[in-house]
Image: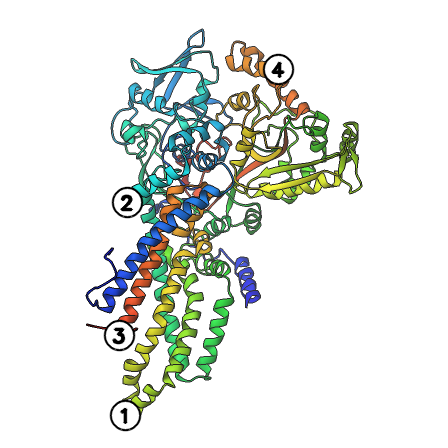
Amino acid sequence: MLSAAAAAVAVMAACAGEGAPRGQAAQRPLKVVGQFELHSLDPSTSGGFFTRLQVAETLVDADLRGALQPGLATGWEASPDGLSWRFSLRPEAKFHDGTPVTAGSVAAALETARTKAGTPLATVPVAAITADGGEVRVTLSQPFAPLAAVLAHTSTQILAPSSYGRDRAVTKIVGSGPYRVERLEQPATIELTAFEQWQGKKPAITQVDYQAAGRSESRALMAESGQADVTFGMDPTSLQRLKQAGKLTIADVTLPRTILLKVNAGHTILGDVRVRRALSMALDRESMATALLRDPEMAATQLFPPSLPEWHRDSITPLAHDPSGARELLAEAGWRPGGDGILERNGDKFAVTLRTFPDRPELPVIATAIQAKLKNLGIALDVKVGNSSEIPAGHQDGSLELGLYARNYALVPDALVTLADDFGPTGAEYGAMGWNNATLTSTLNAMARGTDPEGLEDGRRQATDILQSELPVIPVAWYRQSAVVSHRVEGLSLDPFERSWRLTELTWAK
Amino acid sequence: MNFLPPTPRAPAGPALRVMRQRAIQAATVVLLVSTACFAIIQSLPGDIAFRIAAGRYGYDQVTAASADTVRAELGLDRPAWQQLLAWLGDLLTLDLGTSLVTGASVAGELGLYLSSSLQLAAAALAMALVAGATAGVLAASRPGGVLDRLTTLWVSGARSLPPFLLGLVLILVFSVHLGVLPAAGHGTAGNIVLPAVTLAVGLSGLFARVTRDTVAQIRQSDYVRFAATKGLGGGLVFLRHVLRNTGVTLLPYVGVQLLVLIEGVVVVESLFAWPGLGHALVHAIFWRDLPMIQATALALALLVVALNTVVDLGTLALDPRPRRRELVL
């Protein structure tokens, strides 16, 4: 019975898609399907839903290359000492409740945003955010050049005063973007309608429904059946199947996100840079990318993917697979194979633990591939798949040895903000651990102060060289984001910075 | 609730007795379940504050700072007994609190999940009952006949098919191939059909089996044969004697299956992106969202008590013969 049913699935999958309904498009809402659920309305925890859906705006926006653009603010300037920034607001901008966007309401929204721990704005040395005439003034206690980029982060989205309830908790989403929220049913449904009083170009599609579906098989079937117009979060296998079927359009873009191994450099074994280099050489990144991600181009040759053009360098010596080189480095560091084939030094075995988590389904699979490669070198790697929070918790209590995760370097469009934090003198939960480099710290700090705009290029070169040779984190793979688009819609372009799903640019197919 | 001493009391009707027993049971269940949940969560490995922060902020943004904020805000530093007492105190005032992760009222979230789960369970149960019981009765009319054998085939087929695979097949047929029903999701009327059918297929087999055996057995009983001997027509015998007696067996069985449907269908819920209780409980445990876990577990436990009560009362109505001797003074 089971095999009969499985055969039936295969047959039906083969001839699927032919009967999917088409046409009558303009009458219905655009259906967007993704893997993430909406758990909270607070801008610091809503996972960027309302900026991606263009309901709420940030003061500063960014284009597809990460260059800063006017958002709710039409322009900004910093005082010569870099301590006072003024943002002028788009005149006539209105919130979805019909009230005008004032400097006062923007300052209040930002003052609330900067109290949220763990957000980029909370780490900026802000002294005060105030309304000054029709402008918003941000006063800093020390210069911070990437401030405008931080104000493009989704956690700084500007909500109307009517969004906030008791204790400044967000009770509803009243933004100022081209779409307004029509209905919310947490955790899985968001319905939007075009905002009538939006002053910019009116979106061609006036109604949008977002639906979360947790399983990638379900999402693939929703795309295939024509239930979804735009589907995000495809697993490599489904994507390959849909590509081969050729009935749907697939849009993709490389993200500034890297899968990497965080290494505890304060550890007795891993503190040796030769050992870290050997670990890096042991990885067969190309095979992992081909077999596990089904995308050989995603093998990382350096920390920064090509989607971060300012930081990615074609000229840098790429990280390569070199098992014999790895053996030599380990021997140089004093590691000799023991009786059971596991490396030993002064009676200690080379046994370490790698922690990872299943939220991104490829991580546990990559972890086991790494385990197999290291076993060939005589390294006993214990893989522990648990909750994502065990990596920051292990960083905090010092118990982490190796961690595998994906890091987004452009949560703020200027990667400098994330880097300065990740590779600062004390390290960070998703950055270096037990490692610091005075040259790197001073370079990143100088860049953040912004006193020498000419030195930025040199600074980036210096920083990438240090990261590539010292390997405080070992890059494994880059990321490609794909979306499956039905034939009913046209014009989808993906944003590598994942700031917006750019639904206002979509049109119904003629 | 009735906390009267159990000694001299007025003779109560059987229905009232059932209700009183169940009320005491409900109160005990509330106390035990919430304490047990609390103890289990506290003893799980890992730092609760980090877990909650991961749920709130998404995994790339969990830092020691955000975990500390969570810890301070929620008073996770307090001794465990104080936290438990605070929760029980809130419960006495019927306040389920707010979710640690979403910040929304637990009662509101629970309402959505519970009503989705109940809707799905009711739809699946209705379909399964109609199909299963009908097939069972027909099969029992001629044991060993073609219909009986077909039913047996259906029962073993339906039971051996894992719901996940069946769900995929249904989506492929009705959504991808025929394009008549939505594949997954929640919110429109068509969304419930496929998950309900997926659950109903497996269940209908069980119902058909139980109905068939019970009906066949009752048909052989002395009282049915006597009814036929005294000259009642086949239809009347079936309605008055067979159906009612089958109900006595079938009703408790349906009750148990309904519980399984509400509580144990996480796989089907996740395949069809249906926001049900199972889904909610799994997420809440993953994030250590204590009020949500406790409220969900409590709702499930009380549901068991409530359903058992309904089943007891229903059985009592179908079969009012006294269950025990009572000495009426």
Disc 3: CA contacts within 10 A as few (<14), some (14-19) or many (>=20)? few
Residue mark closest to the camera, 2 vs 1: 2
- Marks 2 and 4 sit apart, C-alpha to C-alpha, by 58 Å
Answer with left or right where residue A164 lies relative to residue A342: left
Disc 1: CA contacts within 10 A as few (<14), some (14-19) or many (>=20)? few
Residue where numbered disc 3 is placed:
B320
Q: Is residue B243 above or below residue A214?
A: below
If you read the primary sequence from the N terminus, does the residue marked by circle 2 or circle 3 appear first?
Answer: 2
Residue where numbered disc 4 is placed:
A438
Residue at left 58%, top 41%? Answer: A363
| Secondary structure at numbered mark 1 | loop
Residue at left 59%, top 26%? Answer: A433
Identify the chain of the residue marked 2, using the numbered disc in the image: B
| Secondary structure at numbered mark 2 | helix
| Quadrant that contains the C terminus of chain B | bottom left
Depth order, front residue of A446/A207: A446
Residue mark closest to the camera, 3 vs 4: 3
Identify the chain of the residue marked 3, using the numbered disc in the image: B
- Marks 1 and 3 sit apart, C-alpha to C-alpha, by 24 Å
Residue at left 37%, top 37%? Answer: B82
| Residues at marks 1 and 4 on the same chain | no
Give, as a three-letter code, the residue at label 3: Pro
Identify the chain of the residue marked 1, using the numbered disc in the image: B
